Image (spheres, rainbow, N blue to C red):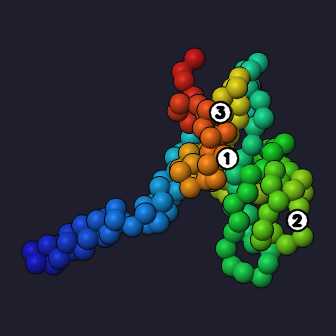
Amino acid sequence: MRKLAAALMLVLAACSAAADDPDAQYAHDLVAAKDKAKASLTLFWEHFAEPAPDEYDFSLKAALPRRDGQAGSEEAWVENVARAPDKIVGELAVLPRYLGDLKKGAIVEFQNDQVVDWAFLRGDRLLGHYTTRVMLPRMDSTQAEWMRPLLSDKPEGDER
């Protein structure tokens, strides 16, 4: 019984420490956003396969292996995606930091399990962008003010 009580105290202490540490809370929120994006990825692929007339600009955020000699990955948005049975191909939408000599527009390949976020426009509203929604408070204020009104109220959009 004492071991259970001690374990419970450790869990509660860890939770309260995360709540008191904005960086820990931010990291936790980003992980949760990626989990939600991955869980709803089938919605992206359904609309990608058969977009409504007002749905366009489908893009994915993928965790790509670093090419600078360091372990880990860099998460980058990829546009103009195409899906094959064994891979996803697209163009880097941003200038990466840790992907060696790859530049914006470079063609990259990755797997479905490397996707950490997704996005597409429905009319003038962005769906998806789970991680972006978490990052908004930490963005440059001009960038955040530009992005906020573009985001749909819910990442999955409103029911049609």
User: From where the camera sits, is residue 11 visible?
Assistant: no
Secondary structure type for disc 2: loop
The alpha-carbon separation of the residues under discs 2 and 1 comes to 25 Å
User: Are the residues flagged by discs 2 and 3 in contact, CB closer than 8 Å?
Assistant: no
The residue wearing badge 1 is 143
Q: Which residue is mark 2?
A: 102
Q: Residues within 10 Å of mark 3 (few under 14, many from 20)?
A: few
Amino acid at circle 2: Leu
Q: CA distance from mark 2 to mark 3?
A: 29 Å
Quadrant position of residue 157: top right
Instruction: Name the residue at 10% across, 78% down.
Output: 2
Of the two numbered discs 2 and 1 in the rendering, the one whose residue sits closer to the viewer: 1
Separation (CA) of disc 1 from disc 3? 11 Å
Instruction: Pick the residue in front: 73 or 30.
Output: 30
Where is residue 21 drawn, in percent x and y?
Answer: 39, 67
The C terminus: image quadrant: top right
Per the image, the residue denoted by label 3 is 150
Identify the mark nearer the N-term, 1 or 3.
Answer: 1
Percent x, y of residue 8 = 20, 69
Residue 125 picture location, percent across and down: 66, 29
Cβ–Cβ under 8 Å for marks 2 and 1:
no
Residue type pointed to by label 1: Gln
* Residue type at numbered disc 3: Leu
The answer to whether residue 16 is left or right of residue 136 is: left
Q: Which secondary structure, mark 3? A: helix
Q: Residue 41, image x and y in percent?
A: 62, 42
Mark 2 or mark 1: name the one nearer the start of the chain: 2
Residue 43 or 32: which is nearer the viewer? 32
Q: Residue at x 72, y 81 (%)?
A: 70
**Quadrant of the rendering where the N terminus is positioned:** bottom left
- Residue that protrudes farthest toward the bottom in the picture: 69
